Image (cartoon, helix red, strand yellow):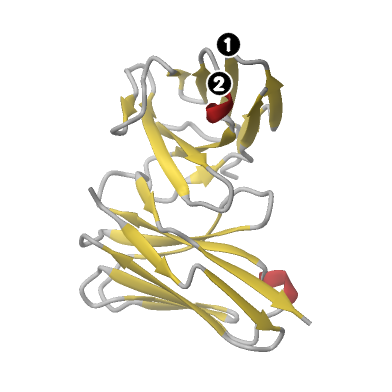
Amino acid sequence: GAVVSQHPSRVICKSGTSVKIECRSLDFQATTMFWYRQFPKKSLMLMATSNEGSKATYEQGVEKDKFLINHASLTLSTLTVTSAHPEDSSFYICSASRGETEAFFGQGTRLTVV
Amino acid sequence: GQQVMQIPQYQHVQEGEDFTTYCNSSTTLSNIQWYKQRPGGHPVFLIQLVKSGEVKKQKRLTFQFGEAKKNSSLHITATQTTDVGTYFCAGNTGTASKLTFGTGTRLQVTL
């Protein structure tokens, strides 16, 4: 149990376009989902906390208009990188919580903006 | 803000040698979790420590949580090539599952 699926696993897009990443909890209802960003050989940096039916809470320094988060249901959260630029290229990972302190991670999405 | 540092950043050992990574938080934690991330993969949950001074073992892995709940360690006995990856500690200050990840320790094991 406690499987989190993230899609797509890899995406290449052109500068100026938008990219949507989906995070689904497959076998449980996620009260909270988290979005992280990871640069090569670096740690995971929390971008935002997403609760179903309410606005996401963004960490300091993360542009909410740049990284749009929607948590429409208890099993789905989406992250849209708007007007992507090469510096947005990174590994984006979601995690989902069912109310406990353990978080279950998706497989991650490697975004390359060209 | 809260910071979680790990040392060393990188360690290269020969198979059979022991390995330890240390994790230090700038603030007191409610609990600490450890994750392993293989190259190209996503973090995989290893364990959670909650009590001050707690020690837990998983086969060759021993995890400790400091008395002040601000530091932790992971020790691997007799490393194997399958232990290769980056080990992250992640601190939780109470909000369910909101984790601050440590800087990570990358372990390389060679024969």
User: Could you tell me residue B66's position as x and y percent?
Assistant: 29, 76
- Label 2 residue SS: loop
The answer to whether B80 is drawn above or below residue B16 in the figure is: above
- Three-letter amino acid code at disc 1? Gly
Q: Nearer the viewer, residue B50 or B66?
A: B66
Chain of residue at mark 2: A
Say which residue label 1 marks.
A16
Above or below, comparing residue B45 to residue A20 in the picture: below
Indicate the chain on which mark 1 is placed.
Answer: A
Q: Is residue B84 left or right of residue A30?
A: right
Element type at marker 1? loop
Q: Position of residue A88 (x, y in %)?
A: 53, 28
Q: For marks 2 and 1, give the CA distance.
A: 6 Å
- First in sequence: mark 2 or mark 1? 1
Residue A83 placed where, x, y %? 53, 12
The foreground one among A85 and B21 is: A85
Vertical relation: A111 (above or below) A105: above
| Proximity of marks 2 and 1: CB atoms separated by less than 8 Å | yes
- Figure quadrant of the N terminus of chain A: top right
Between B65 and B40, which is closer to the camera in this rendering? Answer: B40
* Residue in view at x 61 percent, y 48 percent: B42
Residue in the picture at 20% in, 73% down:
B68
Hey, what amino acid is under mark 2?
Answer: His
Please rate how many residues cluster around mark 1, counting C-alpha atoms within 10 Å: few if below 14, some from 14 to 19, many from 20.
Answer: some
* Residue lying at 36% horizontally and 22% vertically, measured from the top left: A63
Q: Residue at x 47, y 73 (%)?
A: B8
Q: In front: A60, or A3?
A: A60
> Which residue was labeled with disc 2?
A85
Quadrant in which residue B50 is drawn = bottom left
Q: Quadrant of residue A32?
A: top left
